[in-house]
Amino acid sequence: MTTGTIRKESGEGGGSAAPDPYTPSARRLERERFKRARARRATAVAALSTLVTGAVLFVVITGSPGWQRTRETFFSAEYARMALPDVLDGLLLNLKLLAICGVCVLLLGMLLAIARTLRGPVFFPVRALATAYTDFFRGLPLIICLLMVVFGVPALRLQGVTNDPVVLGGAALVLTYSAYVAEVFRAGIESVHPSQRAAARSLGLSGAQTLRYVVLPQAVRRVVPPLLNDLVSLQKDTGLVSIAGAVDAVYAAQIIAGKYFNYTPYVVAGLVFVALTIPMTRFTDWVTARMDRRRAQGGTV
C-alpha cells in the first residue's frame, strides 16, 4: 500500500466522529419513573380530597334548615343580573381611586421613609415628625380616619377646600396607607448594608447621590412584594369610600339591596372585588418567587 493510499484512508476514516448519544442509566430511568408516579399519585390524592371536601360542604350547607331562605336572599340569579351593570359602573370609581391613590401613597410613603432615615442631629425634627405621622396613622383605624376626613374637613368650612366625598375619601386612604408603605420602604432602606454607603462615599458621591443611585435602587427591589401586597389591600379598601356617599361598586350594591331587601348585590360586588384581587395576588406571588430565585442565584444585591 502506497503512502498516498494510507493518507487517503486515514483522511476518510480519521475525521471527527459524531459523539455517541447520551443514554441514561437504568437507575436514573427508574428514579424518573418513580418521580412521575409519585407526582401522579399526589395529584390524584389532592383531587380526591378536594372533591370529598366540596361534597361534604355542599351537603352540610344545602341540608341546613335555612338554606332555602338563604339562597333566595343571598344567591338570587335574578337580582344578580339586575345588580351587575350598576356594580360594574361603580367599579370604575374604585379603579380610578386605586390608580390615583396608589401613586400618591408610593410617593408620600417614599418621602416619609427617606425622612425617617436622614442622619445627623439637624434632621431630628424631620425624623420626629415623620415618626409621629407613621405611628399615628398606623394606629388609627382606616374607617375612623375616613369618617374624620369626610365629615370633619367640610365642617371646618375652609375656603378652597373641596367637599367632594370621592376626593376626601381618597385623601383618607392616602393618609393611612402611606404610613404603612413608609415602613416598608424604611425596612428596605435599612436592609442595605452600610458598606454600600461607605463604598459610594469613598468614590466621591455625596449623601444625596448615594441615597439616589446606590441605596434606593436596592431598597426598592427588595420591597416590591410587600408593596404589591399593600396595593392589593388598597384595592379592596377603596370600597370604604361608600360610607361618604360616593357611588362605587359597594354603594351601588347597597342601593339595590336597600330597594329590594335582597343581599345578592353585595355578593355580586364581593365577587367582583375577588375577581380583581386574585390576578394581583398571583402576580405578587410570581414576582416574589422570581426575586427569590434571582437572589438565590446571586442575580440581585
Image: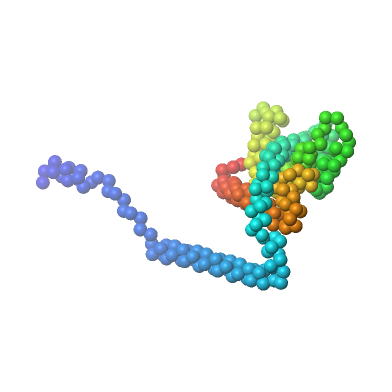
Front position in the image: 215 or 291: 291
Query: Relative to residue 154, is residue 24 depicted above or below?
Result: below
List x then y, in percent, for residue 179: 77, 42
Q: At 42% from the left edge and 62% from the top edge, which residue is drawn?
A: 28
Q: At 72% from the left edge and 58% from the top edge, which residue is drawn?
A: 262
From the viewer's perspective, is 46 left or right of 248?
left
Query: Relative to residue 218, is residue 13 depicted above or below?
Result: below
Quarter residue 190 falls in:
top right
Query: Relative to residue 38, is residue 18 depicted above or below?
Result: above
Front position in the image: 156 or 220: 156
List x then y, in percent, for residue 87: 68, 48
List x then y, in percent, for residue 66: 72, 69
Quarter residue 186 falls in:
top right
Q: At 56% from the left edge and 66% from the top edge, which residue is drawn?
A: 46
Q: At 64% from the left edge and 39% from the top edge, which residue is drawn?
A: 218
Q: In which quarter of the image is the C terminus?
A: top right
Q: Can residue 29 be seen in this view?
A: yes
Determine the residue located farthest toward the right in the rendered image: 156
Q: Can residue 285 be seen in this view?
A: no
List x then y, in percent, for residue 172: 79, 41
Determine the residue located farthest toward the left in the rendered image: 1
